[in-house]
Image: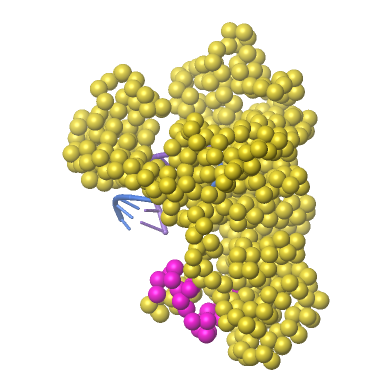
Chain colours: A yellow, B purple, C blue
Amino acid sequence: MQEFRHTIAGDTITVHVPETADDLDAFREWLRQADARGPIAVDTETTGLDIYGPEFRLRTVQFGDAHDAWVILYERGGDFAECARDALQRCRSVLIHNAAYDWLVLDRCGVVPLESLVPRTTDTRILAALIDPRQPSEGGAGTALKPLSARWVDASAPDTQAGLHTVFRSLGVTKDAGWARIPATHPTYLLYAGLDVILTARLAPVLRVEMHRLGVRDALVPYEHEIARICAVMQRTGLLVDQEYAGPLARRLAEEAEQYGAVAARYGVTKIGSGEQVAAALVGMGETLTERTAAGALKTDKAVLLPLADLDRDWQRIGARTPNPLADAVLRAKRAAKWGTTYAQGFLSNLSPAGRIHPTISPLAARTGRMSVTDGLHQLPSSDHVIRRAILAEEGHVMISTDFQAIEMRVLAALADVRRMKEGFLSGGENFDIHMYTARLIKGDRATKRDRKVFKGAGFGKVYGGGVRTLARQTGASEAEIAHAVAAYDRVFPEIKRAAARWQRQAFQNGMTFVSATGRQLPLDRDRTYAVTNYACQSVARDVLGQAMIEMDSSGLLPYMRLPIHDEILASAPAREAREIAHEFERCMTFPLYGVPIVAEAEVGGRSWGSLYGADY
DNA sequence: AACTTCACG
DNA sequence: ACGTACGTGAAGTTT
């Protein structure tokens, strides 16, 4: 048996690494006793993060409590693998930091099914996110094990990941290769593997205490674990990519980017991504650039370039000026490059051997609790079907997309108790249009589609906290018109302003933290307290989706679910039952919220996601 | 690593 | 006192 000692928060802790059958017996004996005392912290070390990649392997499984850690060398196979599996099946209650990763690793490697481990798991990352959902860049501690341990357990606890990266470098391997290549006999590797479970074990009770001190609603803990399980299952399922389509598409877009890039080069722009070059060339051509970036450079983004190319927001000719050929070329080269690289090629680069993408679905990512998804799947162009066409439903299936209707406006009406909005939503029926309704309230029967657009902008301005200038730019209307619209908006829906002021006051009295209707702690930035309206609505809208996802699982729809997209669930279902299943999704997404009906509409498409955006297939 | 841009809800 | 668009992930360039 190898043993390592270390000091954590003044206590000497021990990391045990069994090497013989007797050593494994000692571990089993420890586990029997520890399991009777309380939860066991669990962690895994693997060859990398690409769980569904061809080379992926599980290397070690660690178990521990506050004082002892056991590193089981799973990759040795035989008794070691058997011992780890048996231990995982036996533990009554486990603590895991960022459980979804380890659930999927252990499931993928055939150690223990996700469905078996999930009901016994407490995820310390979920507890941490409920205490402070901010990322480090936003002034929060973040939810990584290192900063949390430093904050709550021991300020001098080693950064085990960074420490191992140093070891990898000294061994002459890259950061990525290190996890697969470092010998499992390396003392730092083993010590840090053990420390992670000890830190997790110590974190859990402290985070529990802090949760209670802050008054985080207890029910959020099991609720978030349910959602985490549902998201992990979707991640395991993944999405099918049409490789015969994506390959040629990636090549075609790369070619297009190259052609427009060559045009830009004629004007001295050798790198279309260089704002500095683009700005210099445009100024050299006699264009006047006025907008500046946060850091003071001249802005050359899409909003600046489109007018120079005489194009509107939909890339249609305006006819107001002679198009600047460089602005036009840069716009087109950038779009082709982005679509080709990030999306078409991205799908192919992230493919598993089975031809699927398994995006990481983070159920509690944003500070409002919103989910996030990797591999670009939350950002695919919606103005055109070409990119989404590359994502397929299963063989014999069709795509179903079910989305909430105007969810954030309904949540706003519910939370701020906006009388005339609620009346509209209650009496409006199936295809109620809140923005046209608002336009009619203010302008009567004279209201036009353009009025609708203006009041839609004013409505979003309320939820997001935008000002007249921004709203004017967004909607394309004049500032005077927007100013009138916002004033009229406040007259018909006076409750919104009052609620915003009330919420800011409550946050101020609660240490700059707003408590959402679902009991979430939402820290506000001192200099943008107006964001509270957005946080209140966005976070509850997220919980409305979370509740609906739990209802979908209870209704047997989880096997069809593929992706959550804020106000939408994308699903793949057998073509013959699609209508019926779509109706079930609608039912799961339909319920009242403080007297406001939340409603959803399902669209049944064809084989590809693009079919819901106009593609033939 | 910071900054900028671009894609979404 | 006033006014502020919110929340993400990925890629490329510059430092």
Q: Is residue A458 magenta?
A: no
Q: Quadrant of residue A210?
A: bottom right
- The residue range painted magenta reads A173-196
Q: Residue at x 77, y 33 (%)?
A: A592
Predominant SS along the magenta part? helix
Left or right placement of residue A349 versus residue A569 in this view = left
- Number of labelled discs? 0
Q: Residue at x 31, y 24 (%)?
A: A310
Q: Residue at x 44, y 68 (%)?
A: A176
Quarter of the image with the N terminus of chain A is bottom right
Nearest to the observer: residue A220 or residue A486? A220
Q: Is residue A187 magenta?
A: yes
Q: Position of residue B1 (x, y in %)?
A: 42, 59
Q: Position of residue A616 (x, y in %)?
A: 48, 32
Q: Is residue A317 something one can see in this rendering?
A: yes
Q: Residue at x 59, y 39 (%)?
A: A398
State whether residue A222 is above or below residue A315.
below
- Residue at the far right: name it: A36
Left or right placement of residue A499 versus residue C6 in this view = right
Left or right placement of residue A603 versus residue A580 in this view = left
Q: Position of residue A63 (x, y in %)?
A: 67, 76
Q: Is residue A438 something one can see in this rendering?
A: no
Q: Quadrant of residue A203?
A: bottom right
Nearest to the observer: residue A344 or residue A470? A344
State whether residue A31 is above or below residue A362.
below
Q: Quadrant of residue A597?
A: top right
Q: Position of residue A218 (x, y in %)?
A: 78, 54
